[in-house]
Image: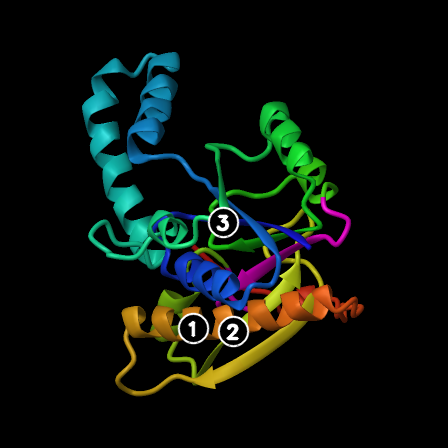
């Protein structure tokens, strides 16, 4: 089975899932490392400010962008000095190929995707929304790993908001990707109790370990030819985390 794994280079969730996937030997894996660097994102902010005649706001805009970028990275469980990354995992598994991109949706990226001909696309902590043209590429679908019990806490910062809201349970959802943000049909979910000593860092780490196990179990079921369950989400119960 040909697998395309999409994630962020220094996301703890991405790293844990990829490491388990490669160690399990579930198939031929290509690793897509995506997302804008801070420098590229800052250039986009600067271009937008110039377009609107706000040249004087460039410096403050850059400071704002850097602050927001750092906050987002922390919420995703990414740390600049973290030893493990997707690239370091790849270095230990030379049989896996690397597919680098800034945006997965433009025609040139989609053409490269089709050339890879993946049977399934697996996603963990990718900060981009897959458009229908990408979702339609793999015959077995696109499957996301989300560190919350959907439909609650959709979005990019579930661990932070679960702690802030004093939830008793956290968990992981494996679901099909559709055109929305974490809105696709659920394949499997598993919960765990939030301990008194848990902080955001420990909650991200616990979620990542569970996500890695559930992703491998899901891939093994696919490889065995099993038809995966699809349970629609109750959208009336949805909440969003940012």
Decide: marks 3, 1 in contact (CB < 8 A)?
Answer: no
Query: In the rendered image, which residue does mark 2 sit on?
Result: 213
- Does any portion of residue 233 appear in the rendered image? no
Residue at the image position 62 percent from the left and 58 percent from the top: 27
Return the residue nearer the eye: 214 or 53.
214
Total tally of numbered discs in the picture = 3
Q: Which residues are magenta?
A: 138-154
Decide: marks 1, 2 in contact (CB < 8 A)?
Answer: yes
Q: Main secondary structure of the magenta part?
A: loop
Q: Residue furthest front?
A: 95
Return the residue nearer the eye: 162 or 190.
190
Distance between the Cα atoms at labels 2 and 3?
21 Å
- Dot 3, crowdedness within 10 Å: few (<14), some or many (≥20)? few
Q: Regarding mark 2 in the picture, which secondary structure is present there?
A: helix
Query: In the rendered image, which residue does mark 1 sit on?
Result: 209
Display colour scheme:
rainbow
């Amino acid at each position: 089975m040909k697998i395309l794994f999409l994630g962020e280079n220094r996301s703890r969730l991405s790293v844990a899932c990829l490491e388990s996937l490669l160690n399990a030997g579930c198939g031929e894996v290509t690793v897509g490392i995506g997302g804008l660097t801070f420098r590229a994102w800052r250039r986009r902010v600067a271009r937008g400010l110039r377009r609107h005649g706000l040249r004087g706001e460039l410096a403050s805009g850059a400071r704002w962008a850097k602050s927001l970028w750092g906050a987002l990275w922390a919420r995703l469980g990414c740390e600049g000095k973290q030893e493990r990354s997707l690239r370091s995992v790849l270095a230990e598994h030379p049989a896996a190929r690397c597919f680098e991109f800034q945006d997965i949706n433009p025609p040139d990226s989609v053409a490269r995707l089709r050339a890879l001909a993946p049977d399934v696309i697996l996603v963990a902590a990718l900060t981009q929304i897959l458009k229908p043209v990408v979702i339609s590429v793999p015959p077995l679908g696109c499957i996301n790993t989300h560190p919350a019990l959907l439909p609650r806490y959709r979005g990019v910062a579930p661990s932070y908001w679960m702690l802030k809201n004093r939830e008793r349970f956290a968990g992981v959802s494996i679901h099909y990707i559709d055109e929305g943000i974490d809105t696709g049909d659920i394949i499997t979910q598993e919960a765990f109790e939030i301990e008194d000593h848990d902080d955001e860092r420990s909650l991200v780490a616990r979620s990542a370990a569970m996500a890695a196990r559930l992703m491998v179990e899901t891939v093994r079921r696919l490889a065995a030819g099993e038809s995966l369950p699809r349970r629609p989400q109750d959208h009336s119960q949805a909440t969003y985390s940012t």
